[in-house]
Amino acid sequence: MRWAIPSSLLVAGAHAHGVILMTKGANGVNAPGSCVLDDTPRDCIVNSCGAQADTGIIRDAEINRGEYGPLGWTQGGGNCKPDAVIGQYMGLSTAPKYTGGRTFTGKLDPIEEEGKKQRRADHDLHLDALFSKRASPSFNPFALPIIGFLGLGGNRTAYFQETIVSDYAGKGKDNGLPTTDDDNTISCVYRQINEDGPGPLSAAVDSTSAATDRNAFKDAKVVQNVPGDGFVGLSLATNTNFPVKVQLPEGTVCEGKVAGLDNVCFVRLRNNAFAGPFGGAGFFTQSDKAKKRALEYRRRKRAEASDMETARES
């Protein structure tokens, strides 16, 4: 069966339309995505209103030429620097904001501390609901072509503008970083801005360089993905948050150093849209059990290699 795709979607714009909004830790700690820009409009979907300001553009050719770092770039902030958002999360610095302006109607949310506290609670509740509504069975109906094209399975949310980076400013000093599950799986929220920002997403994890070395990123398995037509890179979802889970490669141990922290990993996610790839990144660490299992895997592999070498020499 072939699915009819509206011609209006085949002329989608040439700018990024999806971003990693948050990382959700198994330890109950949540953190903003690494390329999120506060003040990006979240109640519209087109480039002319600024909606695409912080959606990541992650092209290997540009990264390999040294034009941008391993996390790519955004229209509103340029090069996505891995220490920017995590620095503000740890209370050490202030991350860039989107300053491009917009035409808008509506009331700006309060920025007082009580407003930040309420928004953090709202974000945390939203994440809990988002990840509880979708399981990841061996047969996943959200992977069917028509479901992916329709962009079903997420939560549509619209609000005046982004504040999540400042809302979580300094929280890392008390709470630490989000952690993986004990099976070394990290959860993220992918926000699809408009039609050419859908999944499916591919993932890579940097466990050593804190997202400063492009060669440190290793392919990882996406075990819960974003719906979308994998061929044309389109879906009908707009301003919709989707849960994503990434399984770290076996033996991965978070060893990166950034913002005064040790044991930091970065996950990078992107789609295959023709004008992209588009996506973003998040930072996290491991649960104690996940780290222990990864170290045991490394020891086992070293022992096996040693045994094979001994056998060859005998």
Image (cartoon, rainbow, N blue to C red):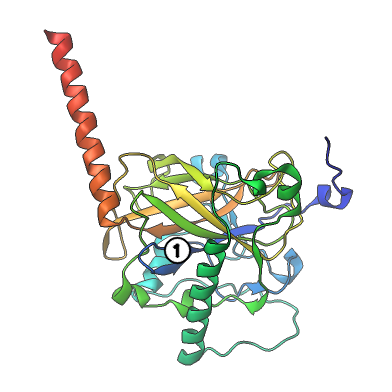
Report the label total: 1
Q: Is residue 82 left or right of residue 235?
A: left
Q: Nearer the viewer, residue 183 or 174?
A: 183
Is disc 1 placed on a helix, strand or loop? Answer: strand
x then y, percent, for residue 218: 42, 40
Whether 74 is drawn above or below 144: the answer is below
In the image as oriented, which residue stretches furthest toward the left? 314
Which residue is found at the position 62% from the left and 72% from the top? Answer: 40
Q: Is residue 74 above or below residue 310?
A: below
**Residue 164, image x, y percentages:** 51, 75
Can residue 37 be seen in this snapshot? no
Q: Residue at x 71, y 55 (%)?
A: 151
**255 to 53, vertically: above or below:** above
User: Which residue is pictured at 44% across the width and 51% down the height?
Assistant: 267
User: Which residue is painted at 67% across and 52% down in the image?
Assistant: 198
Q: Quadrant of the N terminus?
A: top right
Asked if one can make out residue 53 in the rendered structure from this viewpoint, the answer is: yes
**Toward the viewer: 118 or 113?**
118
Residue 141 drawn at (x, y percent): 66, 47
For badge 1, the amino acid type reads: Lys
Q: Which residue is mark 1?
A: 24
